[in-house]
C-alpha cells in the first residue's frame, strides 16, 4: 500500500506492507537517524517525533503516521542552526559511539517541549532510553543545558558541514589508487607503494619481516602495531592504523598525537582506520591496545615526517635545520622568515620513507596539542543524524538477508523444510550445508520468510541429567574442567608456601565468590554488507574489532586468498569486546554470492543475545590469612572458568598460590570489557575487606600498608580523600573502597550506599581515581571512565543471563536489565596525569573496582557480606536486617 508521511518537513510517498513499522518505512526511505536497537520499544534508539509526541518507531505501524509530520534527528535543526538539544549534546560531550544519540535527542526535545525545566527526578522518570556506552552523567547535564539554550537562542551555532560518506569509502587520500595487494600481505617496495599513493610524503613504521604477516605470523599481543602518516600535496595529513573506532575515542586521541608530533592543527589530521585493503596490519582493537600499541608508532611516523620536512626546507633555504621551526603546517626560519608550507615541500613527489619505531618523539610534559581539550571526532555527525554506522551502509541494488540461527548453544541442525519460505514472492532461499539463509527486498520480508522455515534441532550436547541453570552452574563448572592453551589455558603460580602460611595464620578467612554470565548488549546489533566484485574478490563493511582476523576467517571459509578479501569497518555502535571475528560478515558474504548483488544482514536483538558470546561466569575460591599485627601472610585464589587476568594481588603477601582452571561452559563465552579482571578483583578486594574486618583494621590503611606500587597507592588516597573516608556515620549508610591494576592502569573506587530497613539498596555516590599514564585527551578519558563506572553498575547490581539447556531466557532489552538514567548515582572522576609514563588504555580498567567497592560499602552499611555478582538483582540486599546476617 502507498501513503504519504511528512518526513522532516518534506512529504514522502511511502510504499509499505500494512504491518510495516514506522522504523522500517523511514529506513526504506533513506532516513538513517532512527536506529534498530531492540525491536520491542525498550531502548529508545528508534525514537522519533510524530507531531510533538515522542514515539518508538519500531512499535508504531507506519500506516498510523500517514499524513502526519515525522521529525528525526536529521530534521531537528532549523534555519541552519542546531537545535538546543543537539548543541547541548556537543557542548557536554554526551556521547561515545553515538548510535543512541538520535533517539536521545528527539526524546529530549519532546520532554522539553512539555516541561521546560525538568529536575533530575523528572528527567530520569521520562527519559528511559538506553545509552550502552553509559554516558548518563553527561546526558543529564546535556538535558539541563538544552533547557538553558531554549531560552537563549542567540547562543545557538550553525549546523556543521557533515556530509554523508561515500561508500565504498576510500582508504587512501582522495584520488589515490589502492594497491593491487594489501601492504601487509605483499610488503611492497617503497617504490611500488609510492606508485599507489597520491603526491606527498609517506612515513612508514612497519615490521620488515620478509613475506609480511603471512610468513612471519601476526605480531604478539604485546608487539607494537604498524603505522603510516601521509602528508599530501594539498597539505592534508592522513594517519593510517589498523585500529577501529567503536566509541572508545581512539580516533580523536590518535589525531591529537599525530597533530602534536607533526605540528599541524588537529582539524588537518584524518585518521584512516580499520580497512584491510589500505591499513597496516593490526591484531585487533581489544585489551585497551589503542594508546599503548597504536599511539607510539603513529607518533614515530609523524615525528619522522616533521624532521624530513624540516630537512627539506633547510636544503631549500640553505640554512641549518636546527635554525628552522615547524608549526601550523609550515616550516619557518629565524624570526618567521623565510617560510614554506608542508604542501609546497612535497608537491610533485611520491616519496615513501621507512622510519624506526623507536624514533624520537616529544615529551608528554611538553605537549601543546595532545593532552588538551579537543572535540570528539564524529560527534557533530552523530548529533545531526548524519553519522553512518555499519547498519546504515547502503549500495545500489542491495537486498536484505538473514540466516537461520541456533536456538540454543550447542544445538545441531537435523533437518529443515524451506519450501514455504521459497514460495514467497521475491524471496531466495540459500542452503550451504548447515547454513540456511533467505534474501528479500526488505529486511522485514526476509525475516517473514525465515519465519516460515521449519527446522528440527538436536538438543544441546551436554552430558547432564537436567539442563544447566544459574542455580546449578557452580556445581557444573566445578565438575567439568577443561584444557586449553594461551590465555584460555590452565595457569598456576606459587610463591613461598601458601598452604603452611594459611594454616599458621592466627586470622584466616575462606570464601567463594561468583559472577554471573553477562551480555555485552551493544545497542547496534551486529550487521554486515557484502559485495562480490567483478574481479572475483569480496568487500565487506561490518562492525568488527578484528578486521584482519575477519579477513582471514572469510577467506578460509569462502575458498579465497586473503588478498581477495577486503574488510572495511565504519565506526560502529559499541562492542565492549563482543564484536570480534566475522560471523555476521560470513552470513552476508554467502548470501551475496548466491544473490549476485550486495546483501545486507543485521541481527535482531534476540539473535545478538543467543548467538553472540557472553562474559564468562566465574567461581572463585579465596583463602587469606593475617598475622597478629594485621600483616597479610598467606593467600590462595583459584578462578574456575573466567580467566587468570587480575589474579595476582598487588599487595605484599609473602606466600601465594594462584590457580586458573578453565571449565566446559554451557554457554558461549568470549571477550568482555576487562574480562576476567572484573571477577578476580571483585573476589580479591572483597576478601581483603573481610580480613580487615576480622583483624579490626581500617580497610584503606590495610591496603596502603601492603602496597609498594606508589601509583596505586596514590589513586587509593585520592579516591578516599574525595569520598571523605571513612564515609558517613549515619545508620544504614556505608562507604567501601577497592583498587586494582589492569592494562598498566591503576584505579581506585570508593562507593557510598544506603541500605534501607527493608533491604532496599541505593548507590549514592561513586568516586574513582584513575592513573593511565600520560593523558592524551582529558575530556575523552573522563568520558570513558564515567561510562565504565556506569556500565560496571549493571553486572555489580543486577545484570545476569538467565538460561537453561543452552537457551537464553531473557534475550531482550525488556527482560535483560542494563543501566539507565534512573540508576545514575553521583559520580566524581579524578584523573592523575603521569607525563613521564606512556599512555595506557582508559576504557577497561575503571570497571574493575566498581563491584567490590559497592560490596564493601554494603557490608559497612548493614553488616551483610555479599559474595555473588550481581549483588542485588531485585534491588534489595539479601538478608539485610536479619539476625546473624553479617559475614
Image (cartoon, grey):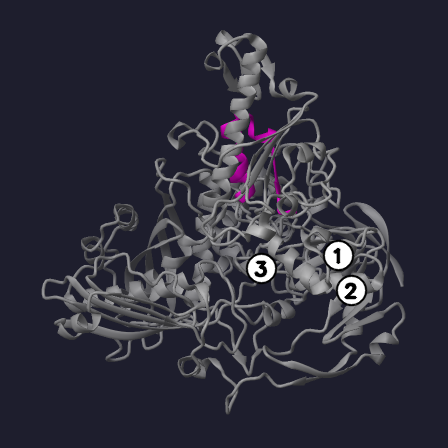
Mark toward the start of the polypeptide (1 vs 3): 1
Residue 549 in view = yes
Residue drawn at point x = 76 percent, y = 60 percent = 24
Q: Secondary structure at mark 1?
A: strand
Question: Which residue is the site of mark 1?
Answer: 530
User: In the rendered structure, does residue 213 fall within the stretch colored magenta?
Assistant: no
- Residue drawn at point x = 40 percent, y = 32 percent: 364
Q: Nearer the viewer, residue 164 or 55?
A: 164
Q: Which residue is mark 3?
A: 580
User: In the image as oriented, which residue stretches furthest toward the bottom?
Assistant: 465
The Cα atoms of the two marked residues, 1 and 3, are separated by 17 Å
User: What residue did someone put label 2 on?
Assistant: 591
User: x, y percentage for residue 708?
Assistant: 22, 50
User: Is residue 254 found inside the magenta-colored segment of the image?
Assistant: yes
User: What residue range appears in magenta?
Assistant: 250-275
Question: Mark 2 or mark 3: which comes first in sequence?
Answer: 3
Q: Is residue 106 above or below residue 762?
A: above
Image quarter of the N terminus: bottom right
Q: Are marks 2 and 1 in contact (CB under 8 Å)?
A: yes
Q: Earlier in the sequence, mark 2 or mark 1?
A: 1
Secondary element type, mark 2: helix
Q: Is residue 789 left or right of residue 384?
A: left
**Front residue of this view, candidates 207 and 608:** 207
Does 290 sit left or right of 623 as displayed? right
Of residues 35 and 604, the one nearer the viewer is: 604
Amino acid at each position: 500500500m502507498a501513503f504519504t508521511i511528512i518526513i522532516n518537513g518534506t512529504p514522502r510517498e511511502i510504499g509499505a506492507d500494512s504491518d510495516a513499522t514506522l522504523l522500517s518505512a523511514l529506513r526504506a526511505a533513506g532516513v538513517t537517524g532512527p536506529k534498530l536497537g531492540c525491536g520491542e520499544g525498550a531502548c529508545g534508539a528508534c525514537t522519533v517525533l510524530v507531531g510533538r509526541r515522542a514515539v518508538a518507531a519500531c512499535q508504531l505501524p507506519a500506516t498510523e503516521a500517514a499524513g502526519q509530520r515525522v521529525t528525526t534527528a536529521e530534521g531537528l535543526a532549523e534555519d541552519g542552526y542546531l537545535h538546543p538539544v543537539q548543541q547541548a549534546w556537543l557542548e557536554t560531550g554526551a556521547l561515545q559511539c553515538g548510535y543512541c544519540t538520535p533517539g536521545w535527542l528527539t526524546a529530549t526535545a519532546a520532554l522539553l517541549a512539555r516541561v521546560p525545566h525538568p529536575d533530575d527526578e523528572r528527567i530520569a522518570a521520562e527519559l528511559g532510553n538506553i545509552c550502552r556506552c553509559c554516558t548518563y552523567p553527561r546526558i543529564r547535564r546535556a538535558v539541563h543545558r538544552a533547557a538553558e539554550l531554549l531560552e537563549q537562542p542567540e547562543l545557538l551555532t550553525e549546523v556543521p558541514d557533515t556530509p554523508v560518506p561515500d561508500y565504498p569509502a576510500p582508504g587512501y587520500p582522495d584520488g589515490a589508487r589502492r594497491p593491487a595487494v594489501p601492504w601487509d600481505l605483499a610488503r611492497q617496495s617503497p617504490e611500488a607503494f609510492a606508485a599507489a599513493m597520491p603526491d606527498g610524503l609517506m612515513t612508514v613504521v612497519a615490521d620488515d619481516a620478509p613475506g609480511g604477516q603471512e610468513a612471519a605470523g601476526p605480531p604478539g599481543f604485546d608487539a607494537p602495531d604498524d603505522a603510516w602518516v601521509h602528508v599530501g600535496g594539498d597539505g592534508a595529513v592522513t594517519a593510517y592504523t589498523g585500529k577501529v573506532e567503536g566509541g572508545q575515542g581512539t580516533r580523536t586521541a590518535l589525531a591529537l598525537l599525530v597533530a602534536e608530533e607533526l605540528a599541524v592543527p588537529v582539524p588537518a589530521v584524518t585518521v584512516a582506520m580499520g580497512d584491510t585493503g589500505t591499513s597496516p596490519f593490526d591484531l585487533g582493537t581489544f585489551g585497551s591496545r589503542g594508546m599503548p600499541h597504536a599511539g607510539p608508532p603513529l607518533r614515530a611516523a609523524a615525528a619522522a615526517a616533521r624532521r624530513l620536512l624540516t630537512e627539506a626546507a633547510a636544503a631549500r633555504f640553505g640554512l641549518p635545520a636546527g635554525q628552522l621551526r615547524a608549526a601550523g603546517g609550515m616550516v619557518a626560519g629565524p624570526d618567521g622568515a623565510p617560510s614554506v608550507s608542508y604542501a609546497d615541500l612535497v608537491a610533485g613527489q611520491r616519496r615513501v620513507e621507512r622510519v624506526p619505531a623507536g624514533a624520537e618523539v616529544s615529551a608528554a610534559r611538553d605537549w601543546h596539542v595532545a593532552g588538551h581539550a579537543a572535540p570528539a571526532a564524529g560527534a557533530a555527525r552523530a548529533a545531526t543524524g548524519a553519522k553512518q554506522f555499519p547498519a546504515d551502509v547502503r549500495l545500489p541494488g542491495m537486498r536484505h538477508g538473514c540466516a537461520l540461527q541456533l536456538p540454543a548453544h550447542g544445538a545441531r541442525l537435523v533437518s529443515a523444510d524451506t519450501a514455504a519460505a521459497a514460495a514467497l514472492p521475491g524471496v531466495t532461499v540459500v542452503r550451504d550445508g548447515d547454513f540456511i539463509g533467505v534474501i528479500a527486498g526488505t529486511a522485514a520480508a526476509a525475516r517473514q520468510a525465515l519465519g516460515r522455515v521449519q527446522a528440527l534441532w538436536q538438543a544441546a550436547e551436554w552430558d547432564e541429567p537436567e539442563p544447566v541453570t544459574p542455580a546449578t552452574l557452580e556445581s557444573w563448572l566445578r565438575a567439568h574442567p577443561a584444557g586449553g592453551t594461551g590465555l584460555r589455558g590452565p595457569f598456576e603460580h606459587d610463591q613461598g608456601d601458601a598452604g603452611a602460611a594459611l594454616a599458621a595464620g592466627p586470622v584466616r578467612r575462606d570464601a567463594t565468590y561468583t559472577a554471573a554470565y553477562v551480555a555485552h548488549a551493544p545497542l547496534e546489533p551486529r550487521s554486515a554488507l557484502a559485495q562480490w566484485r567483478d574481479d572475483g574478490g569480496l568487500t565487506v563493511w561490518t562492525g568488527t574489532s578484528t578486521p584482519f582476523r575477519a579477513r582471514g576467517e572469510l577467506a578460509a571459509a569462502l575458498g579465497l586468498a586473503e588478498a581477495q578479501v577486503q574488510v572495511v569497518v565504519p565506526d560502529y555502535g559499541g562492542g565492549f569486546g563482543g564484536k570480534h571475528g566475522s560471523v555476521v560478515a560470513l552470513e552476508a558474504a554467502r548470501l551475496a554470492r548466491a544473490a549476485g548483488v550486495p546483501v545486507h544482514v543485521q541481527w535482531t536483538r534476540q539473535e545478538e543475545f543467543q548467538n553472540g558470546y557472553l562474559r564468562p561466569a566465574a567461581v572463585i575460591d579465596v583463602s587469606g590469612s593475617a598475622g597478629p599485627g594485621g600483616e597479610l601472610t598467606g593467600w590462595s585464589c583459584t578462578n574456575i572458568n573466567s580467566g587468570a587476568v587480575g589474579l595476582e594481588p598487588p599487595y605484599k603477601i609473602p606466600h601465594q598460590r594462584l590457580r586458573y582452571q578453565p571449565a566446559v561452559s554451557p554457554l558461549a563465552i568470549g571477550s568482555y570489557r576487562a574480562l576476567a579482571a572484573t571477577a578476580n578483583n571483585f573476589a580479591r578486594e572483597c576478601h581483603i575487606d573481610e580480613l580487615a574486618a576480622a583483624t579490626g583494621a581500617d580497610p584503606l590503611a590495610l591496603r596502603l600498608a601492603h602496597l609498594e606500587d606508589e601509583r596505586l597507592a596514590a589513586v587509593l588516597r585520592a579516591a578516599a580523600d574525595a569520598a571523605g573516608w571513612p564515609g558517613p556515620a549515619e545508620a544504614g549508610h556505608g562507604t567501601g573502597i577497592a583498587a586494582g591494576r589492569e592494562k598498566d592502569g591503576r584505579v581506585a573506587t570508593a562507593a557510598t550506599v544506603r541500605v534501607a530497613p527493608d533491604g532496599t539498596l541505593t548507590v549514592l555516590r561513586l568516586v574513582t581515581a584513575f592513573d593511565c599514564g600520560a593523558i592524551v585527551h582529558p575530556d575523552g578519558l573522563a568520558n570513558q571512565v564515567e561510562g565504565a563506572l556506569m556500565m560496571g553498575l549493571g553486572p555489580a547490581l543486577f545484570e545476569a543471563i538467565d538460561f537453561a539447556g543452552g537457551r537464553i531466557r531473557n534475550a531482550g532489552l525488556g527482560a535483560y536489565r542494563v543501566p539507565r538514567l534512573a540508576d545514575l548515582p553521583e559520580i566524581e572522576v579524578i584523573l592523575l596525569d603521569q607525563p613521564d609514563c606512556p599512555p595506557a588504555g582508559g576504557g577497561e580498567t575503571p570497571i574493575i573496582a566498581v563491584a567490590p567497592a559497592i560490596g564493601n560499602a554494603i557490608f559497612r552499611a548493614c553488616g551483610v557480606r555479599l559474595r555473588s555478582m550481581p549483588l542485588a538483582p531485585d534491588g534489595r540486599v539479601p538478608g539485610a536486617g536479619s539476625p546473624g546476617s553479617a559475614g
